Image (cartoon, rainbow, N blue to C red):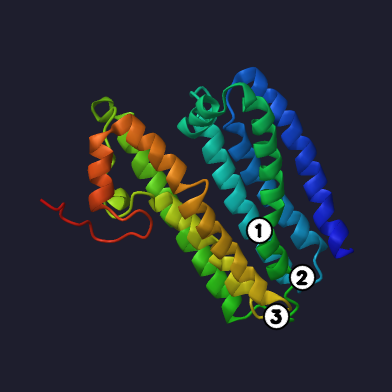
Amino acid sequence: MNLLVLILIPWAVLAALMSMLWLYQRKTHNAGIVDVAWSFGTAITAIWFAWGADGFTHRRILVGAIAGIWGVKLGYYLLSRLIGAHEDRRYEMLREKWGDKTQQRMFIVFQIQAFWAVLFAIPMLIASSNDHPELVWYDWLGIGIWGVSIIGTGIADAQLNAFRKKPENQGEVCKRGLWRYSRHPNYFFEWIHWWAYVAIGFAGAWGWLSILGPVVMLFFLLKVTGIPITEKALVRSRGEAYKKYQRTTSAFVPLPPKEEDQ
């Protein structure tokens, strides 16, 4: 299949889907559905790319499988948090900030997420295009990286959920397990996931471009939609307790906590 057509088809489909979901959030006043759609959309786009790419068949199946499992797992987790819950603090803050222009700007947000779903599936396309005629060591390395990411994210999410379920922890800051060493271990292990496609795709044609996946994702997590917005909301809701947590605990990479300066 022509490369441009291969990319434009999922973009068009996701743009239409995001338009319908934008209408849905107008009714429900909960924009968190866009995160769910991005997760499933990226996974489905990756599977589509794996189907349409011209790489080694077994590698295409491998990439489609690990990307699909990752996306479904993340999407299901986000959906389970969304059902019956209030809107994520990030979107509440945007509504307050945008005022009367909220819906126009929210539509742009939803369309950007459609674009990002395709953009972040490009490393999967590159990995699926590697035509080396057998699975070799770097394919198994990619599976290992993917496994570390899935396990690490699962542990971080489980620890946070267990903390939140206890009534006595209401309004408190989770500092248990992986959260003792990183303020966002879930983000860190999600980021690790993108290196799997670098390992699998780097040896193929245009493989060096696969590194843009983790690089761009790191930028978004550290500077755009990840940590900055999340932490602004957490400081707002947790106050001085979270500010102390910021002073003693690594923002991203798990590291031993520091003693607070006196």
Q: Which residue is mark 2?
A: 57
Count residues near mark 2 (Cα–Cα under 10 Å), then give few for <14, some for 14-19, many for 20+: some
Which quarter of the figure is the N terminus placed in?
bottom right
Q: Which residue is mark 1?
A: 65
Could you give the CA–CA distance between mark 2 and mark 3, rounded to whole angstroms? 9 Å
At x 66%, y 44%, the residue is 113
Looking at the rendered structure, the kind of residue marked 2 is Thr
Q: Where on the picture, by quarter, is residue 170? A: top left
- Mark closer to the chain start, 2 or 1: 2
Determine whether the residue tagged by mark 1 lies in a helix, strand or loop.
Answer: helix
Q: Which residue is mark 3?
A: 134
- Mark closer to the chain start, 1 or 3: 1
Discs 2, 3 touching: Cβ within 8 Å? no
Residue 154 appears left or right of 139? left
Looking at the rendered structure, the kind of residue marked 3 is Glu
Classify 168 as above or below 248: above
Determine whether the residue tagged by mark 3 lies in a helix, strand or loop.
Answer: loop
Residue 86: image location, x then y, percent: 48, 23
At x 69%, y 29%, the residue is 104
Count residues near mark 3 (Cα–Cα under 10 Å), then give few for <14, some for 14-19, many for 20+: few
Residue 125: image location, x then y, percent: 72, 64
At x 80%, y 56%, the residue is 7
Discs 1, 3 touching: Cβ within 8 Å? no
Q: Is residue 176 visible?
A: no
Residue 157 appears left or right of 203? left
In the displayed image of the protein, which residue is found farthest to the top? 27
At x 70%, y 80%, the residue is 134
Could you give the CA–CA distance between mark 2 and mark 1, rounded to whole angstroms? 12 Å
Residue 75: image location, x then y, percent: 58, 42
Residue 42 appears left or right of 144? right
Count residues near mark 1 (Cα–Cα under 10 Å), then give few for <14, some for 14-19, many for 20+: some
